[in-house]
Image (tube, rainbow, N blue to C red):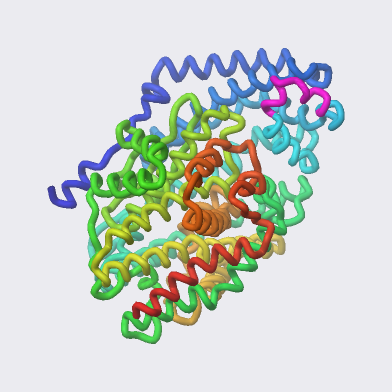
Amino acid sequence: MTLSAAKAALPEWDLRDLFPGRDSPELEAAFAAAEKDAVAFQGRYEGRLAGLDGKALGAAIAEYERLEERLSRITSYADLTYAGNQSDSTIAKFYQTVQERVNAISTHTLFFTLELNRLDDAALDAKLTAPDLARYAPWLRDLRAFRPHQLEDRMEKLLHEKYVAGRAAWTRLFDETMAGLRFDVDGKSLTSAEALHLLSDRDGKVRRAAAKAVGKTLGDNVRLFALVTNTLAKDKEIEDKWRGYAAPISARNLANRVEDEVVDALVSAVRESYPKLSHRYYALKAKWFGADRLDYWDRNAPLPQADERDFDWPAARDTVLDAYAAFSPDMAKVGKRFFDNAWIDAGVRPGKAPGAFAHPTVPSAHPYLLLNFQGKTRDVMTLAHELGHGVHQVLAAGQGHLLADTPLTLAETASVFGEMLTFRKLLDDAKDPKRRKAMLAGKVEDMLNTVVRQIAFCEFERRLHAERREGELEPARIGEIWMDVQRESLGPAFRFDPEYANYWTYIPHFVHTPFYVYAYAFGDCLVNSLYARYAQAPAGFAERYLDMLRAGGTKRHKELLAPFGLNAADPAFWRGGLSLIEGFIDELETLT
């Protein structure tokens, strides 16, 4: 089978495990039951939580959990349907309608978390002696961390109801605009996923044509993207001010259950390491290309004379599952379920969301993976990454809907660990020295993209949100901030043409989840330290690792890392994670 034929045979997910269809009676029945139960829940509990004993309060939270899971099942179905084709106006209407109906239903349960946060600490501690309530202690702990930032009930209700006409609407505008863009590369009309994929093509002329096309099309739409960015940054500023957050990043840190100083230490450690990581590596890569400097479209270019292997889907699947199985047969067994069932959408097609993700849906169902698989080694690594998320989500589902979810910082642990396992397998299988060098260079580039690039993104967001507080930023000024952080992070080995100033516009995290990006660097450094422990003492490690994944959101990073002798508050933790990347670059220098 040719590679093009193999691509045509890529799997598509089957969302009928959630609901039979957009117009199905089952979906309408779920809406009706959710609304009826939410109204009854409000009538039964509003204003009465302080008077409940521990057992009764535990029962109330269990009922709330069932309500939330039903609504999450509905929204998951809408999210995934929309991700499959963001250009279809009928699907877009369905997606918006679901958001509005779920939002209206959830106004009846909004009181519950607000009222829980008003309970006196001593009174709640007394109630927590009841086993039915003690089960939810980690969820209550994380919920009550937001108490200092909670507003008056009517204000909270207003913000909740306006969400669908505010941030959610601007996010949808961004998504549909990106999905509708086409990039003219040498006469071919490509989606963003297809055009960006060409930036790793072997042919420099193809990379240049794709880079110029991406920059031009993004530039043609930069005013719209600047309007979205300015509006959402102002919206965040207003809400942060009312809630009393110290800095634009503080709300994300609290949601990630990580202290501001820990994130600051991470960001500082990575920025201080730019010269010995990205600057040094890309200067080395320029020498391999026989040049003093690289064009920006050469950042992810394969090495000269490197034998870039193409993977069909079965080869990619087997590579990842074999790597997982060598570490833990149990982990591979969970991963195999994604391939044995229609839980993955892997093909590239117009209208489909770009990039890749793993959607946990709800514990009573299963996760789904979205990929844009095009047969390169990086696509295999992406599969390993997203499958890691999926395995984590399956294992954590046993905690239940409220306790399964992990903060973003820990959510990236299993995904990056899955990448590392797969990379080690590919490296071990590479007997040819040239291929081994190319594999090692590719891994370094992936790690730089995960650590250096994402911290640069975080710095871009910090500067953008800080300046937005002084007034709206023109597109050119946003581009200047972008170029400043790119030059700082990537170093003097690069030439940047003017259109590269528009490349900030396609990064979805800036719109969907502000300050998400540092979680990738957190996860990569954490995994580097974890993998070092595994290499030093493999006995019993896999069991401890799977237990960590099964914990879901019940434990914070200090508790989860303690069995491995790691502490993210220790600066040496971050230096240890970064030193692994530095060691790979050292090895590449010796190979050169």
Q: Is residue 463 above or below residue 423?
A: below
Specify start and end residues of the magenta stretch as a single range. 125-136
Is residue 133 located in the magenta-colored stretch of the structure?
yes
* Residue extending farthest left: 1
Say which residue appears at 54% left-offset and 14% top-offset: 33
249 lies left or right of 23:
right
Say which residue appears at 56% left-offset and 71% top-offset: 485
Quarter that holds the C terminus: bottom left
Q: In this orientation, which residue lies closer to the viewer: 446 or 148?
A: 446
Say which residue appears at 83% left-offset and 25% top-offset: 126
Residue 274: x percent and y percent? 55, 74
Q: Is residue 385 above or below residue 38?
A: below
Q: How many marks?
A: 0
Residue 91: x percent and y percent? 40, 34
Q: In this orientation, which residue lies closer to the viewer: 75 or 285?
A: 285
432 lies left or right of 416:
left
Q: In this orientation, which residue lies closer to the viewer: 121 or 171?
A: 121
Residue 94 in view (yes/no)? no
Snapshot quadrant of residue 266:
bottom right
Residue 147 in view (yes/no)? yes
* Residue extending farthest bottom: 292
Residue 214: x percent and y percent? 37, 63
Residue 366: x percent and y percent? 44, 30
Is residue 548 located in the magenta-colored stretch of the structure?
no
